[in-house]
Amino acid sequence: MLQRNEPLTSKPSDRQELAEDFEELLRRRLETKTTWQELIDRVLDGARAYLESGDKEALHTQELERTEDELSAAVDSDPDHAPPSALFALANLCWVRGVARQGTVWGVLNRREAIRLYDLALIKVPDFPRDAMPTGVRTVLDEPDLHKRRLVASHEEAVELLSSAQRTRDRVLIREGIEILRPAITAAQQGSNALPTAWHTLGVAWRLWHEVTGEKAALDEAIVALRVAASGLAGDDPQRANRYQELYAVLCARQALQNDDPSCLDVAITALRTATQALPNDDERRPGWLMGLARDLLALSRRDGAVAPIKEALRVLIEVSEASHATPVDGQQFLTLLADVYQQGGELTGDQTALDAAQAARAAAARL
């Protein structure tokens, strides 16, 4: 038995045996000359094994990871002489791993590394056929402006994480999506046609963060982002109506949390008004959006004691009645809202005709 201070030493015979084993392993390693192509083939075989079987573990075998490390080390140690096919092989493996772990931070990191390696490979072989690369890679690398390229890549990564977070409600994925987008948006040049979409995704991310965490400040961040996203669209952009309606929904959520803030209602009305103006006349959502606008205008009139919102609400409800021929609305809800609007107008102005119209509308609603 060893004493407390007795040094731990091996016997001479043990040291000799270990030395002989090491020398033998070293001799075998030096005698084994693995070619570039052999390493490349092994890496591609590993990616192919997953694509054929769907087994994610095929991408993480010890042999494949050892081969990947060896090929990466060889490329790093002699980048000038490394064949482009080595970079393409490593990039392909990273991309496949990203696909296999889609919707995870690890998957996004592999996707990012794949794009970096494809980019390096294209520097060596500029005429490499673009069609041989994944679509997601081409979308990024075909963009000549580096700031916009970063924005496009970051947006794709964020969308991947947020799509997964919407299903799982995973805070880590939401926060990663936000932190990926923010610096890319800041670095992008103003006027870039990719910015409105990126701002919109950031707004969606902040709203999702609020839904999961309950943080009120997240709604304020969402409002800022969605407002920038909507205002950045051209007047004839087909997404304009949807963007302003999403902004309206977030403003309503913010108003519900802090109903003593008068600005929320005013900004919400402006957003919904813009959304309905951008919506095609034959869109089936139009009557419902107009009904919502009329309700908000009624609330504004009650808050401020103003007649102008009532006049606008009546014009909006006339438009609802015209649009309802194509898309029917709930008659009872429509007549009840019409009665409330007439009642408010009559009380503010003393107009008996408006009060009589309110009574008639309520009677009609009761008969339905």
Image (cartoon, rainbow, N blue to C red):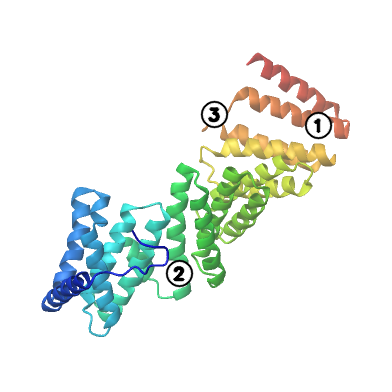
- Name the foreground residue: 184 vs 308: 184
User: In this figure, which residue is indicated by the disc labeled 2?
Assistant: 150
Q: Quadrant of residue 6?
A: bottom left
Image location (x, y in percent) of residue 145:
44, 75
Kind of element beneath mark 1: helix
Image location (x, y in percent) of residue 340:
75, 28
Q: Quadrant of residue 342?
A: top right
**Above or below for 139 versus 359:** below
Q: Mark 3–mark 1 contact, CB under 8 Å?
A: no
**Would you say residue 267 is visible in this rendering?**
yes
N-terminal of the two: label 3 or label 1? 3
Image location (x, y in percent) of residue 276:
60, 45
User: In this figure, which residue is indicated by the disc labeled 3?
Assistant: 328
**Above or below for 295 versus 10:** above
For the residue marked with disc 2, what is the amino acid? Arg
**Above or below for 163 versus 146:** above
Distance, label 2 to label 3, CA atoms, is: 46 Å
For the residue marked with disc 1, what is the amino acid? Gln
> Label 3: how many residues lie within 10 Å, few (<14), some (14-19) or many (20+)?
some
- Name the foreground residue: 70 vs 148: 70
Q: Quadrant of residue 112?
A: bottom left
- Which residue sits furthest top? 367
Distance, label 1 to label 2, CA atoms, is: 54 Å
